[in-house]
Amino acid sequence: MSAKGDLAQRYIDELWKNHNLDATSELFAPDHLYWDPYLPEPARGPEGAQARAAAYLGVFSDGVVTENELYEDGDLVFLPWTFVGTHDGEIEGNPPTGKRITIEGLHVFRIPGDRIAETRAYWWDLPGAMRDLGLMAI
């Protein structure tokens, strides 16, 4: 694995396994953009990435991401992942259900230097996860 792959792996380890949100200042470039389908516009800078992780961990405090095989192509790192967590915080005005969810997705990192410049998060079945929590009827 290259230094870029190591940096993407460190993102998973620090934020999503150790819940060390302070690591964002070491991982992300000052002008970092974090694209999330749940947001109307990208979160900006290390602070924006930290706020996104804090928001998800505020809803799923035991949430853990397990990475699957990482792929690299130039400045891009593709990291498929699986998130598992218990809904123990309020989400969109809905109280905690205590239910566990599993959701899969992909992060695409653009790493032109020694920090992550851009992150694009893709969730494979966010409506299904909301349905599993009883928060959406499909």
Image (cartoon, rainbow, N blue to C red):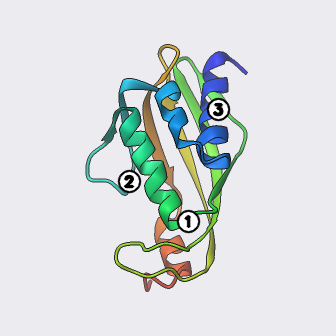
Q: Residue at (35%, 73%) from the top-left corner?
A: 92
Q: Indicate the quadrant where residue 55 lies.
A: bottom left
Residue 43: image x %, image y %? 33, 42
Q: Which mark is residue 37?
A: 2
Q: Helix, strand, or loop for circle 2?
A: loop
Residue 15: image x %, image y %? 58, 43
Horizontal side, residue 53 vs residue 1: left or right = left
Amino acid type of the residue that numbered disc 2 sits on in the rendered structure: Pro
* Label 3: how many Cα within 10 Å (few below 14, some 14–19, many 20+): some
- Does residue 116 lie above or below 42 as drawn? above
Amino acid type of the residue that numbered disc 1 sits on in the rendered structure: Phe
Gap between marks 3 and 2 measured at Cα: 23 Å
Mark found first going from the N terminus, 3 or 2: 3
Gap between marks 2 and 1 measured at Cα: 18 Å
Q: Helix, strand, or loop for circle 3?
A: helix
* Label 2: how many Cα within 10 Å (few below 14, some 14–19, many 20+): few
- Does residue 22 lie above or below 86 as drawn? above
- Does residue 75 lie above or below 25 as drawn? above
Given contact means CB atoms under 8 Å apart, are the residues at marks 3 and 2 in contact? no
Q: Indicate the quadrant where residue 50 lies.
A: top left
* Label 1: how many Cα within 10 Å (few below 14, some 14–19, many 20+): many
Residue underneath mark 1: 60
Residue farthest to the top, as pictured: 113
Q: Which mark is residue 91?
A: none
Q: Which mark is residue 10?
A: 3
Residue 125: image x %, image y %? 52, 64
Q: Helix, strand, or loop for circle 1?
A: loop
Amino acid type of the residue that numbered disc 3 sits on in the rendered structure: Arg
Mark found first going from the N terminus, 2 or 1: 2
Q: Nearer the viewer, residue 128 or 22?
A: 22
